[in-house]
Each structure stands twice: as structure tokens, then as C-alpha cells.
Amino acid sequence: MRNVRRDGMDNLKTDENKKEISEDERKRAETEVQKLTDATIAEIDAAAAAKEKEILG
């Protein structure tokens, strides 16, 4: 998950450096990427906890 997040952030910085997006757009997109990352990690943690409970009975 961290690698995907890092790649996304790097791509946003590259786009900003190429003048394809503004600094404000980059910051908004980084916030969105972070929110999606946090939500995905929460889903993964919930699935892992459910599986652990299932296995341990």
C-alpha cells in the first residue's frame, strides 16, 4: 500500500514540475490520495481481523 501511495505522490509532483497541474491541484490530489490510502488500510485491517477471528474461532 505504501508503495502505491508513494508512486501516486511522485506522479503528482512530476506533473506539477511539468506544469501540467498547479501546486493547489497537487495538494488537493495528495489529500485525496491520503484519504483513499487510509480507507484502504482500514479495510485491509478489518479483513485481517475478521480472518484472524475466523481462524482462531
Image: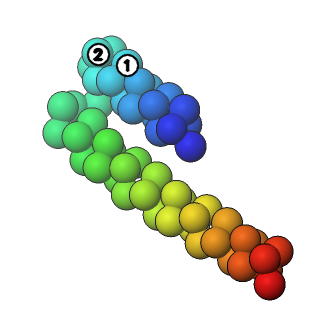
Amino acid type, label 2: Asn
Residue at image coords 50%, 65%: 42
Q: Is residue 13 left or right of residue 36?
A: left
In this view, the residue farthest toward the bottom is 57
Is 24 or 38 nearer to us in this picture? Answer: 38
Q: From where the camera sits, is residue 36 visible? A: no
Judge from the rendering whether residue 26 lies leftward or rightward of residue 9; answer left or right: left
State the image coordinates of residue 16 (x, y, percent, origin top left). Answer: 29, 23
Identify whether 21 is placed above or below 30.
above
Do the residues under discs 1 and 2 have CB atoms within 8 angstroms? yes
For label 1, the residue is 14
Q: Nearer the viewer, residue 57 or 44?
A: 57
Quarter residue 21 falls in: top left
**How crowded is the residue under tag 2: few (<14 C-alpha within 10 Å), some, or many (20+)?**
few
Image x and y of residue 52, in percent:
72, 71
41 up-or-down from 50: above or below? above
Quarter location, residue 49: bottom right
Give the crowd class for mark 1: few <14, some 14-19, many >=20 residues within 10 Å.
some
Where is 53 relative to 38, above or below? below
- Whole-angstrom CA distance, mark 1 to mark 2, is 5 Å
Q: Which mark is residue 25?
A: none
Q: What residue do we see at 56% from left, 43% from top?
A: 1
Farthest front residue? 56
- State the residue at coordinates (78%, 77%): 56
**Mark 2 highlights which residue?**
17
Q: Amino acid under label 1?
A: Thr
